[in-house]
């Protein structure tokens, strides 16, 4: 089956969207961007493919009478077990990598003790993995580093103590290894992992016994569908660093404009507030970009600014919006400069202003800055679509809605919970167009004009 | 406007000629202590080269020194020196590079120290910073400083009052100071002779700039034009050398045109012409080649630019130096320089260029240092887009401060802009 | 009237970004016109002589939220043009019939063109003052320039401006300047009686009121303030320099004084005392206005100083005349004239051993803590220095 993939390499996360010939989105994937865009692109692409398999399973199982009313449970169970398989595989990789560092001269004389300690630690980690991926269990993150890292430190500290080994040496090999593991291209053998996950699921819930021909066949068929990477388009902040050929790269402005158009076809103005920049884009009825503006050289008022504020207040970035929403009055904040953010914040708090009021003021300041960029790009035309990480922040959205209405009247404002995928979606659509030969012929047109 | 990168760029006869000319001017300036030649410093916009020549005074242009130093990656340290001396990070980096150069021994591009100028000719044309710049230099050099106040074309025209004012200043202030500094008596017929040559060279320059109207332009009218305007915007307007240079240049471009060739870039012949742009604002000098490459490697040719008019507008409303009315014509030259024109006129000029040169749109390179250009450019962009119906784009860099050139940022915007143009073409083709 | 009543009125005028009082003046009689001007200087006499109300447009102040104005200016340009455009696009200046953009800097100069493009129904002019100070050269140019300004005002108002109208207005402004200078002198003599925030508000009121009314207000203030019980503090005395265009937030002026510095001279608003003598009412009034600028106007950074020896000496004179002990340079961020001039002024102060500090502000600066700290440290160091 032909697949068209868009990959959006953001400064913090990398997103991928996979679509078919009919422009139906089959899968999406996300990963942290790391410092290695190659791996981030490969991981997000693989995640999109995994998610596509599940879509295909879903389609296949909907036809099976035995599974009526149970498709979601079944797929949920399958995904859980698949993630467990994936996690175990990465744990093994991490263990092997750690063990590989033991040969270093600086650990001379400790090799045996270290390997033993590592084996004990990873043994425990693997055991813990089963309840971690049990039905109903919650994980704080889906990124490997986030899950494994914290537990490794806790367990290895204990193990080191008992083995009379320095905890630091274990931490040291871990630090080196996790970077290698994270930056390694993702392992293949997806089909194997699916089959093993299926076995585990059946052990867990015998009602999903795949030996039943009626179930096994559609699964096998879905797995047999070849996902051909027909055309991949890269976009976003990191796109220029990718080893993509030039005709596989699209600007993030174009992708965002088109992506927003695909999500909401009546979109005429798009605002995206990402980690590093703020973009305002005007598109026509076909999603073609008419005009755009980005924040200038200075990153004032971008998502990163909220990050600084969160650090300054010793809070998580996702906690800022909810606290700001509790404000009774909005403090006047003048600077959205990340350099001055901390100083201004401390000044306000020292003057006795409430944290929530100051935060509300900061959110308003960010949105005021975005309003200027919107104004620079040509204002707001109905409908208005808001995307990017800050679109999930309720305090920011409230201010935005208020200011849009004050300045441009009643306008439909669209915010998709999956808006983080907007750029990747546009990229996938460009991939489809490119595969259909949509970029050829433009030079002749120039000549004719 | 600098010979430094010409060696590895283009080996055309005109280029060699230019290199020779610029080197000879630096030699003339740096050998002044031995030869006794008097040196005047002045600015590119509103420079009075023919008049200076009437007194055998050598013409030194601090703006050009600053940009030459930037191309040789020397301005970062110079600017930082000036900031240590108390200059704000917020202000013009040409000024700071110049003051920093002085602090580093004022070494000219030929490696020899610059002599102190014998006079500062403050031709106050289209930029308020010039005034402060020369007050700062005067504090160091303590030399005669003559202000030539060139009124701004606020109402979009040159009135008799404005012209009379400039002519009177030339007669009563500038010329007497030059006579006093040089010991040479002013001879208006000598000025007329030089101006005849100015006009000749100007004709050929205009022909070259307008060759970009051809679709498949033989020149780049921004990056390439930096070289073409070099002699006439600096110490050579009114010289036989300039006449010869522009005639050579013209014949070379004629040949390129006949052969259907595009512009020459530092990386050789440029490939296919995909985008035609009009550019407003000066270039960045610290990363000049890298900046240019972002255009030519994507097939973008600049077909007209405001920067090619910064030291005189010859190709827009037909101005030529006029030997019949030499002082009046110098006055009009000064007042007509690009940044001395008001924003509505600059906007109309840019919109006209987009149309006349069949460009895909206006790109603005907004320069942090230069409010004379930059203040109002965002409105200009909107207006030109509205009038021409062609999309514009906006990038931000600086003249000579390497801290303000962010390649990823600039490239991102340029790429987005080129792709937007392409997408609109396709959209337009589909709709049609 | 009490000081409080007067200053309360000034504060209302200061905070009113809708210019209600000027609107009321205009609506009081049919056909009245209002002409706005930006810093640093225009001769208000001429606008007044045309029967119009000149009002100073000094930006949007510290509380105006700038949304559309930011769309027209890059981040490295000062704030006054963007807040002024914001006032324009939000219709807060829709009662203004003409706008003058003086010869201050490239930004204000180009704003004249921005205004022409954005508000074509308003008469917008760049207003040039001469950089050549010979009567037969710069004087002649300026006189003709003023003549052109009068003609455009005549056209705008459908009026004829006679020499007697001009003489009458010259007298009104001579009187106004006399009282402006008296207020400044009073503060030099008794700075503890006249907090600078009050003086500032009093002068700002003059930017929106008819000059006759403003003159009366200053007379009332001086009469009232003499009876005010205000304790003299152990503050040092400073001259503030560099805030002649974009205006600092009132909080900055208060912070400097709270930190222990009496501001005994400043350049916040220069138009009201730019001319340092009475302009003669004898002879050709235009020539008198023109010549007053050539020979009797205050130095400011956008004005060329023909003599190298004289450059910046005025600041040391201000320090002496006001009995100040130091200078605080407070320039707006990205203000080319102020910031480029500063090193030259530093050298003059260094030569004369006058201490100084420098910081920058924007009209909407929100953080006063660093300013309080710097001004406080400066005050302490001056006291220590003079004690030693």
Image (tube, rainbow, N blue to C red):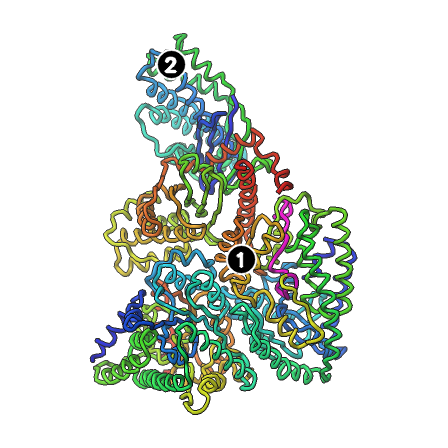
Residue at horizontal 50%, vertical 43%? A237
Which of the two residues, C146 or A219, is positioned nearer the viewer here? Answer: C146
Cα–Cα gap, marks 2 and 1: 61 Å
Residue at horizontal 28%, vertical 44%? A322
Q: Is residue C37 visible?
A: yes
Rendering coords of residue A145 (x, y %) = 43, 35
**Looking at the image, residue A301 lies above or below residue B21:** above
Which of the two residues, A448 or A196, is positioned nearer the viewer here? Answer: A448
Please tell me the numbered disc located at residue C351. Answer: none
Q: Is residue B34 left or right of residue C113?
A: right
Please tell me the numbered disc located at residue A63. Answer: 2
Q: Residue B147: name its quadrant.
A: bottom right
Q: Secondary structure at mark 2?
A: loop
Q: Chain of mark 1?
A: B
**Looking at the image, residue A68 lies above or below residue B427:** above
Quarter of the image that includes the C terminus of chain A: top right
Residue at horizontal 48%, vertical 19%? A191
Q: Is residue A217 magenta?
A: no
Which of the two residues, B406 or A162, is positioned nearer the viewer here? Answer: B406
The segment highlighted magenta reads B293-315
Q: Chain of mark 2?
A: A
Q: Is residue A266 left or right of residue A348?
A: right
Q: Which residue is mark 1?
A: B366
Q: Is residue A267 left or right of residue B250?
A: left
């Amino acid at each position: 089956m032909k697949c068209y993939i868009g990959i959006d390499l953001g400064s913090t996360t990398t997103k991928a969207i996979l679509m078919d010939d009919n422009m139906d989105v089959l899968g999406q994937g996300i990963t942290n961007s790391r410092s290695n865009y190659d791996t981030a692109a490969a991981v997000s692409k693989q995640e999109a493919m995994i998610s596509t398999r599940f879509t295909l399973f879903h389609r296949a199982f909907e036809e099976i009478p035995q599974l009526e009313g149970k498709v979601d449970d079944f797929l949920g169970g399958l995904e859980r077990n698949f993630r467990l398989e994936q996690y175990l595989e990465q744990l093994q990789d991490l263990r092997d990598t750690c063990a590989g560092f033991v040969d270093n001269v600086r650990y001379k004389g400790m090799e045996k003790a270290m390997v033993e300690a590592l084996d004990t630690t990873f043994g425990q980690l693997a055991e813990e993995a089963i309840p971690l991926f049990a039905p109903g269990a919650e994980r704080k993150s889906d990124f490997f580093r986030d899950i494994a890292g914290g537990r490794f430190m806790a367990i290895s500290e204990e193990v080191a103590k008992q083995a009379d080994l320095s905890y630091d040496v274990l931490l040291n090999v871990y630090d080196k290894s996790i970077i290698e593991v994270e930056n390694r291209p993702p392992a293949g053998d997806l089909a194997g992992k699916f089959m093993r996950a299926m076995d585990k699921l059946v052990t867990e819930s015998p009602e999903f016994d795949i030996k039943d021909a009626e179930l096994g066949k559609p699964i096998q068929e879905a797995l047999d569908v070849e996902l051909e990477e027909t055309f991949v388009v890269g976009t976003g902040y990191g796109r220029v660093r990718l080893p993509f050929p030039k005709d596989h790269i699209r600007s993030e402005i174009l992708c965002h404009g088109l992506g927003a158009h695909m999500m909401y076809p009546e979109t005429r103005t798009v605002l995206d507030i990402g980690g590093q920049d703020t973009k305002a884009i005007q598109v026509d009825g076909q999603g073609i970009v008419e005009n755009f503006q980005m924040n200038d050289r200075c990153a004032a008022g971008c998502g990163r600014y909220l990050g600084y504020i969160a650090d300054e207040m010793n809070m998580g970035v996702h906690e800022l919006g909810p606290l700001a929403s509790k404000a009774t009055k909005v403090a006047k904040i003048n600077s959205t400069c990340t350099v001055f953010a901390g100083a201004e914040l401390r000044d306000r708090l020292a003057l006795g202003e409430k944290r929530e009021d100051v935060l509300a003021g900061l959110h308003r300041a960010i949105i005021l800055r975005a309003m200027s960029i919107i104004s620079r790009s040509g204002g707001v035309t109905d409908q208005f679509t808001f995307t990017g990480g800050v679109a999930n922040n309720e305090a920011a959205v409230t201010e935005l809605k208020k200011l849009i209405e004050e300045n441009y009247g009643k306008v439909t404002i669209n915010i998709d919970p999956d808006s983080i995928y907007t750029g990747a979606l546009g990229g996938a659509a460009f991939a489809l167009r490119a595969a259909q030969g949509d970029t050829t012929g433009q030079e002749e047109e120039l000549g004719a004009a | 406007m600098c010979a430094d990168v010409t060696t590895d760029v283009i080996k055309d006869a005109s280029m060699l000629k230019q290199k020779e000319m610029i080197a000879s001017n630096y030699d003339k300036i740096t050998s002044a202590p031995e030869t006794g030649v008097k040196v005047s410093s002045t600015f590119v916009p509103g420079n009075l080269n023919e008049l200076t020549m009437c007194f055998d005074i050598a013409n030194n242009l601090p703006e050009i020194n600053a940009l030459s130093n930037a191309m040789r990656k020397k301005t970062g340290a110079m600017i930082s020196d000036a900031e240590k001396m108390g200059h704000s990070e917020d202000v013009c980096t040409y000024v700071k590079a110049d003051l920093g150069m002085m602090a580093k021994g004022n070494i000219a591009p030929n490696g020899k120290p610059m002599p102190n100028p014998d006079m500062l000719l403050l031709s106050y044309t289209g930029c308020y910073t010039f005034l402060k710049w020369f007050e700062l230099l005067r504090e160091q050099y303590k030399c005669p400083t003559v202000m030539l106040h060139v009124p701004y074309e606020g109402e979009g025209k040159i009135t008799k009052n404005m012209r009379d004012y400039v002519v009177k200043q030339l007669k009563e202030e500038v010329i007497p100071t030059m006579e006093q500094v040089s010991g040479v008596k002013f001879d208006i017929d000598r000025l007329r002779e030089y101006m005849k040559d100015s006009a000749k060279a100007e004709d050929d320059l205009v022909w070259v700039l307008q060759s970009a109207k051809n679709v498949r332009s033989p020149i780049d009218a921004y990056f390439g034009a930096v070289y073409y305007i070099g002699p006439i915007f600096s110490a050579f307007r009114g010289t036989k050398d300039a006449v010869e240079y522009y005639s050579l240049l013209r014949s070379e471009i004629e040949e390129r045109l006949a052969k259907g060739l595009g512009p020459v870039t530092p990386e050789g012949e440029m490939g296919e012409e995909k985008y035609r742009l009009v550019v407003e604002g000066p270039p960045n000098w610290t990363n000049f080649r890298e900046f240019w490459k972002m255009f030519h490697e994507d097939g973008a040719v600049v077909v007209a630019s405001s920067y090619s008019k910064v030291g005189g507008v010859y190709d827009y409303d037909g101005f030529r130096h006029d030997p019949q009315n030499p002082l009046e014509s110098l006055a009009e030259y000064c007042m007509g320089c690009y940044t001395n024109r008001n924003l509505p006129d600059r906007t109309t000029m840019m919109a006209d260029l987009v149309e006349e040169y069949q460009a895909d749109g206006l790109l603005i390179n907004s320069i942090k240092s230069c409010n004379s250009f930059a203040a109002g450019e965002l409105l200009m962009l909107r207006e030109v887009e509205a009038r021409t119906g062609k999309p514009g784009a906006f990038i931000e860099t600086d003249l000579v401060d390497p801290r303000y050139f962010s390649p990823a940022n600039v490239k991102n915007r340029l790429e987005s802009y080129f792709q937007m143009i392409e997408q609109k073409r396709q959209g337009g083709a589909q709709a049609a | 009237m009490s000081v409080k009543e007067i200053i309360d009125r000034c504060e209302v005028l200061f905070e009113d970004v809708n210019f209600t009082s000027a609107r009321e003046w205009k609506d009081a009689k049919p056909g009245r016109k209002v002409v706005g001007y930006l810093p640093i200087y225009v001769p208000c006499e001429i606008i007044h002589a045309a029967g119009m109300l000149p009002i100073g447009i000094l930006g949007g102040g510290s509380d105006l939220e700038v949304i559309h104005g930011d769309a027209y200016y890059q981040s490295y340009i000062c704030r006054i043009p963007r807040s002024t455009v914001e006032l324009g696009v939000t219709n807060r200046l829709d009662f203004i019939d003409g706008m003058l953009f003086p010869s201050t800097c490239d930004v204000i100069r180009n704003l004249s063109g921005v205004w022409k493009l954005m508000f074509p129904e308003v008469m917008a002019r760049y207003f040039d003052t001469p950089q050549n100070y010979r009567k037969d050269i710069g004087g002649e140019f300026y006189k003709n320039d003023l003549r052109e300004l009068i003609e455009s005002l005549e056209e705008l108002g459908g009026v004829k401006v006679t020499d007697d109208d001009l003489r009458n207005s010259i007298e009104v402004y001579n009187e106004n300047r006399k009282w402006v200078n008296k207020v400044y002198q009073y503060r030099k003599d008794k700075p503890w009686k006249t907090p600078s925030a009050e003086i500032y508000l009093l002068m700002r009121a003059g930017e929106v009121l008819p000059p006759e009314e403003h003159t009366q207000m200053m007379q009332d203030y001086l009469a009232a303030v003499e009876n005010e019980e205000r304790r003299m503090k152990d503050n040092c005395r400073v001259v503030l320099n560099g805030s002649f265009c974009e205006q600092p937030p009132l909080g900055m002026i208060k912070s400097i004084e709270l930190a222990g510095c009496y501001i005994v001279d400043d350049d916040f608003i220069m138009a009201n005392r730019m001319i340092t003598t009475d302009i003669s009412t004898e002879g050709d009034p235009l020539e008198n206005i023109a010549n007053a600028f050539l020979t009797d106007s205050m130095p400011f950074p956008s004005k060329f100083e023909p003599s190298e020896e004289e450059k910046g000496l005025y600041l040391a004179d201000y320090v002496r005349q006001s009995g100040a002990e130091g200078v605080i340079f407070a320039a707006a961020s990205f203000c080319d004239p102020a910031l480029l001039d500063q090193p030259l002024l530093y050298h003059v102060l260094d030569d004369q051993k006058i201490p100084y500090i420098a910081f920058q502000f924007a009209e909407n600066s929100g953080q006063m803590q660093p300013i309080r700290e710097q001004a406080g440290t400066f005050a302490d160091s001056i006291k220590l220095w003079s004690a030693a």
